[in-house]
Amino acid sequence: MIFNKFNIKLLILFLFIFNIKYAFCSPKIDCFKKFKIALYNYGYFYSVEKDIGIDKDLALELQKRSHCQIEIINDMPRIRTLKSIEAGFIDFTTSSILTPEREFYSHFIFYNQIKNFALVRKEVKTPSWNVFMENKNLKFGVVRGYKHGTSDEKIEILNKEHRVIDYAEPEQLYEALKKNEVQAILSTTPVYHFQFKKIKNLESKVVIYDWNPQENYVKSGLMLSKKVFYKEQVVQWEKLVNEMISDGTMYKIFRKYLPEKEAKSTMLK
C-alpha cells in the first residue's frame, strides 16, 4: 500500500513537471479560424507534381503543434497568392523573401536562407560572371518574371546583347540547359537538387559555381497576412517555428530532401 502511494505521488509529480515543460515550450496559439496556407511550386520546397516538400512538411508540423485547422492550398499561382495575402483571403504562404512592398501587408517568420548558384555546362568552363560575359556565343536562361538579386544587372546587359532566353516554367529552363539551348542558369540548392533527380543525366552535364561570392544568403520563410494576424499572434507562431528549429525537427525536414551540407546551409539556425 505504501509502495502504491509512493508511485501515485511520483506519477503526479511527473505529470506536473511535464505540464510545466509543455506549457513553457509550446506557445498557446489562437485558433480563431480555419487557416489557409498557400504553398509555392519551388523544387524541394514544394512540388505540386509530387505533392511533397519542405514547406508541406512544415505546414503539417505547424498544424500538429498548434492544434489549429490548416487547409493547404497547392494550386494557386504565386502572383495570385501574394494578392490574396494582401487582401487577407489567404493567411500564410511559404518560402517568401521580405521586400519593402511585401512588408507593407505581411509579417514574416524566417526559417531558411537561399542563394543563387550558377549551373554551367561543363564544356563551357566559365567559373565567373566576367568569363561568361566575355564569350559572346554563350546564352543565359531565365524563368520569365523571376528576380535574381545582384545578378539582375548582369542579366540585363546580356539581354541587351540578345543572349538571354526566357522560359515560362522552371522545367523548361532545366530542359533547355540539358539540351544546350542555354549554357548557364541560376538556381537555389533545393530547386536544382530536385531537378537533378527529375531530369535524367542533367547533373552529369553541369558544374555548379558561386558567381557572386560576396553575396550573402537571403532569409526566406513564412509570410502572414496583416489583415488576419496581429503582431502578438505572429509572435506565438514565431515561437512555434523557433521551437521546431531548436528541437531538431526543422533540420530533419530539410535533411529529408537535401544532402547534409546543403540542409545545414539552407536551414536557419
Image (cartoon, rainbow, N blue to C red):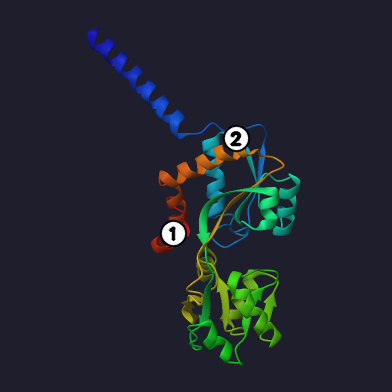
In the rendered image of this protein, does residue 134 appear above or below residue 208? below
> Which structural element holds mark 1?
helix
Q: Residue 182 versus residue 265: which sits nearer the camera?
A: 265
* Label 1 to label 2: alpha-carbon separation: 28 Å
Mark 2, residue position: 68
Amino acid type, mark 1: Ala
Return the residue found at the far top.
1
Query: Would residue 71 be found to the left or right of residue 246 on screen?
Result: right
Q: Check disc 2 and give the amino acid type.
A: Cys
Q: How many numbered marks appear?
A: 2
Q: Which mark is residue 186?
A: none
Location of the N terminus by quadrant is top left
Identified at 49% across, 89% down, the residue is 123
Task: Say above or below: 159 vs 37.
Answer: below
Residue 149 at x, y percent in the picture: 60, 69
On screen, residue 44 versus residue 5, left or right, reads right
Cβ–Cβ under 8 Å for marks 1 and 2: no
**Image position of 266 with respect to 183: above or below:** above
Q: Earlier in the sequence, mark 1 or mark 2?
A: 2
Marker disc for residue 263: 1
Q: Residues within 10 Å of mark 1 (few under 14, many from 20)?
A: many
Q: Residue at x 38, y 21 (%)?
A: 16
Q: Residue 147 at what x, y percent from top left?
A: 65, 69
10 Å neighbourhood of mark 2: few (<14), some, or many (≥20)? some
